[in-house]
Amino acid sequence: MSNPLKKLASQTAIYGLTTIIGRLMTWFLVPIYIGAAKFSTDQYGIITEMYSYVAFLVVFLTYGMETAYFRYSTQKDESKQKVYTTIIYSLLATSFIFISVAFLFNQSIADWLKYPNNKEFVTWFAIIVGLDAVSSIPMARLRAENKATKFVIVNFANIIVFVGLNLFFLAYCRPMHASGKTNWIIDTFYNPNIGVGYVFISNLIASIIKFVLLLPEMIYAKYGFELSLLKKMFIYALPLLIFGLAGIVNETIDRIMLKRMLFDVLGEKETLSQIGIYGACYKVSIIITLFIQAFRYAAEPFFFAQEKEVNAKENYSKVMTYFVIVCATIFLGVMLFIDVVKYFIPNEAFWEGLHVVPILMFANISLGIYYNQSIWYKLSGKTKYGAYIGIFGALITIALNYVWIPVYGYVGSAWATLICYFSMMLLSFILSRKHYPIKYDLPKIFLYLTISFGFYLISSYIDLTSGFLKYSVHSLLLIAFAAIIYLIERPKKVVI
């Protein structure tokens, strides 16, 4: 039998590859937006705010059915195909209703969003969210059936189209038009009045292409819709939906609340500037999120598949330790070389927010650990606890943002994010000890995180004027951290 941990690593590499590359490519669009396209802090704030709503709506429109598919497609008394088609028909229906409502009330929604002159944003995003919600299930099926080739093709097609169109409109057309060097291509396809809207148009076209590529997976699906099966899956998924919505509240509500709470005080331009600065600095911390996302793609099916193995809990514990090692290493690497990393945002107007990066990175580490722990309530069928924990975190997020945003602005939002995710992680651990105990190696986990943060603090207190000397010392600190991990984790020799 093959080593299950090696299998997880290979699946993380396969399914996480497109995720990492895709997120990296969209991540590298940030310097395009800020550098080549020269979006100001307030213009980038529009992008940050609108995608905060998108994240919420995608979770709402998938309503936990991705996890429900993994769960019920592995049950002996259910047909995989029947589970799949039932979910597809359900998502098609709800997405169609959502898009129709958005079309009918686009102006009212735009007024509420405080973009009265951009009702087209509502229409575009309604289609994007609806198509992405439906597409999530065929993509989940490709993962579950280990159809890595098609999964990679579809994901890369979506990524390449989105990034390519962004580069065309914003790295080519916009600078050329601004310099007065126009041609028939620019005159035909580019309208300077659309501005940041080209980011959204690129996303719309990419989502349509992804949906079209997945159509064969939906059109040729056998069996039909079974209401009784959908009810069972919905009951299972409802707590996950609540948890998912609460999770998105934790992840994005700060940017929405910044707009709502500061708009009348600071005005539109300054408020959007604050959101833009915070959003750009949040992107710096996304390096850890990239790893977490790639890990989750492979980990969820792996955890379910390992459930019946004798040493399942031991494997879950090892996975957690290795996960923390990677996260701690990423944190230390970014913070030791933040003076270089900051040039990822090629506009000094955004750098005033860099002090929130370590806060956000530790927040994301806490979230990643929580994701690992969350398997206890999914495997035990006690998904309601996921909802409870998510609601608990959402209440903390909303309360702390409400109190701190008027005083500290986006800095208060960053601290609220850390406290929220740490509290969720702690509560989940306490509950898991009772309902599905897994013996995690807590001393190692605490040690690695402490050393990583300690080395960062040491580097911040060493004032070195020479750039070469500074980076040499920081490199030695990173090497020392890696050496400590090796000494602790290296295979022990067996004496016969």
Image: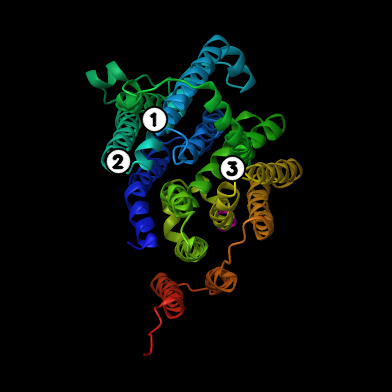
Residue 125: in sight, yes or no? no
User: Mark 2 or mark 3, which has the lower sequence index?
Assistant: 2
Amino acid on which disc 3 is placed = Glu
Q: Residue at x 46, y 58 (%)?
A: 309
Q: Nearer the viewer, residue 317 or 346?
A: 317
CA gap, disc 3 to disc 1? 34 Å
Q: Secondary structure at mark 2?
A: loop
Quarter placement of the C terminus: bottom left
Residue at 49 percent across and 74 percent down: it is 464
Secondary structure at numbered mark 1: helix
Which amino acid type is shown beneath numbered disc 1?
Answer: Gln
- In the picture of the structure, the residue carrying the numbered disc 3 is 251
Disc 3 is placed on an element classified as helix
- Which residue sits at x=41%, y=34%? 80
**Where is residue 256 drawn, in percent x and y?**
63, 34
Instruction: Work out whether 44 lies above or below 377.
Output: above
Residue 52 has which mark? none
Q: Position of residue 17 (x, y in %)?
A: 33, 48
Q: Which residue is mark 1?
A: 81
Residue 257 counted in the magenta span: no
Q: Which residue appears farthest toward the left when viewing the image?
A: 184
**Res 162 quadrant in image:** top left
Cα gap from disc 2 to disc 3, whole angstroms: 31 Å
Within 10 Å of the Cα at label 2, are there few (<14), some (14-19), or many (20+) other Cα atoms? few
Q: In the figure, residue 387 lies in which quadrant? A: top right
Q: In the rendered structure, are the residues bearing label 2 and label 3 in contact, judged by CB atoms less than 8 Å apart? A: no
Bounds of the magenta segment: 356-360
Q: Which residue is mark 2?
A: 147
Front-most of 52 and 431?
A: 431
Residue 436 point in image, percent of width and height: 62, 57
